[in-house]
Amino acid sequence: MKEDRSGYTIWFDRGTPGIGYIDQTCIPGTYRVTMAYTPHELAGAIQVLAIRGAPALGVAGAYGVALAALCADAESIDSFLDTIKKDADMLRRTRPTAVNLSYGIDRVFGRIRQEKDVHLAKEAALAEADAVAREDEQMCRGIGETGNALIPNRCTILTHCNAGALACSTWGTALGVIRSAVAAGKEVSVYACETRPLLQGARLTAWELKEEKIPVTVITDSMAAMLMRKSMIDLVIVGADRITRDVVVNKIGTYMHAVCAKYHGIPFYVAAPLSTFDLTSSEIDITIEERDRDEIARWGGHITVPPDVSVYNPAFDPTPVQMITGIITEFGLLRLPDDWDRVTEQVSMADRIIRD
């Protein structure tokens, strides 16, 4: 990666203060580092997908609450907490489906609430947000190690959307597995689905892999089944925005690839950290974000759908866990629903470590 922060795609600038990030809406045409100086500016960046990807949203949410804390002008701890909560709730509403955003927000806000002094609360907020960012890198490396053990010495992998360094603070989840396999000396090539309607695969995944000199070919989403039928795909690896006991929620189109992989007997893996698991919800409880009509109805300044014709534009789809070969985590490979008790144990253990 070419960013100035030693491989990081989102970071906190204490001198400003502000949150620096690679603007993903500009890639691949332009590489641009942008700053968010207020929680509202951060929320705008999240809404337009300048910052996107489940783990990256967790880091952004954590740093967003820290930024709100540092910018808050309040003398009493009660008024301070009221101000932070308003900003936290505003950030949470930007992307209702991805659970990592709420995870990062709740981690830092929960830490702030333990303090009785405003100055100490501000210090605690930034320290906790930094911890979330450090853990993001550690979990990506752990996911890479787990996934590398599943990758043949020579293979072709299909991936959908972008689950690379741009979707995290560094390294990546699904692409992190690929990067770890390549670093281990394996010969890996990738088919990246373009990922309509915003082309995160064509724009972001292809750009990341090109930067890493990993062979990549972009295909339209509708080509994947044909490639599977011709035995051109050895396995599929995607990321996730929320995992419950019954479904994995990821970028729209993931379910279609899972169905096709199941039919053709191709392993279908999800690479995601523990923070992406939602222990309290099932598919029926999840709000699937629906995005603007123009993402489908316009492209490059041209109208692609006749005026007054309706458009359905969900950002994500749920894939039943029975369709998934395994979930690659920093704690090893999990198979749902059989390993759900193991998931809850790991989450509880992680929560205890965080509290201590």
Image (cartoon, helix red, strand yellow):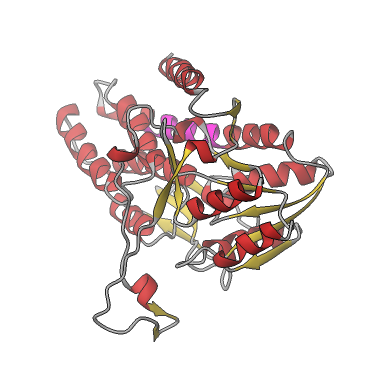
Image: magenta residue range:
125-136
Q: Is residue 30 left or right of residue 347?
A: right
Q: Is residue 75 visible?
A: yes
Residue closest to the far front = 263
Q: Is residue 259 above or below residue 72?
A: below
Q: Is residue 314 left or right of residue 76?
A: right
- Which residue is pictured at 31% across the width and 26% down the height? 110
Q: Is residue 126 magenta?
A: yes
- Which residue is pictured at 64% across the width and 31% down the height? 142
Q: Is residue 72 left or right of residue 42?
A: left
Image quadrant holding the N terminus, namely bottom right
Magenta-colored segment: predominant secondary structure: helix
Which quadrant of the figure has residue 89?
top left
Question: Residue 179: x and y, percent?
Answer: 71, 46
- Which residue is pictured at 68% across the width and 61% down the height? 227
Which quadrant of the figure has residue 192?
bottom right
Question: Residue 301: x and y, percent?
Answer: 40, 84
Q: Nearer the viewer, residue 222 or 294?
A: 222
- Which residue is pictured at 50% across the width and 30% down the height? 274
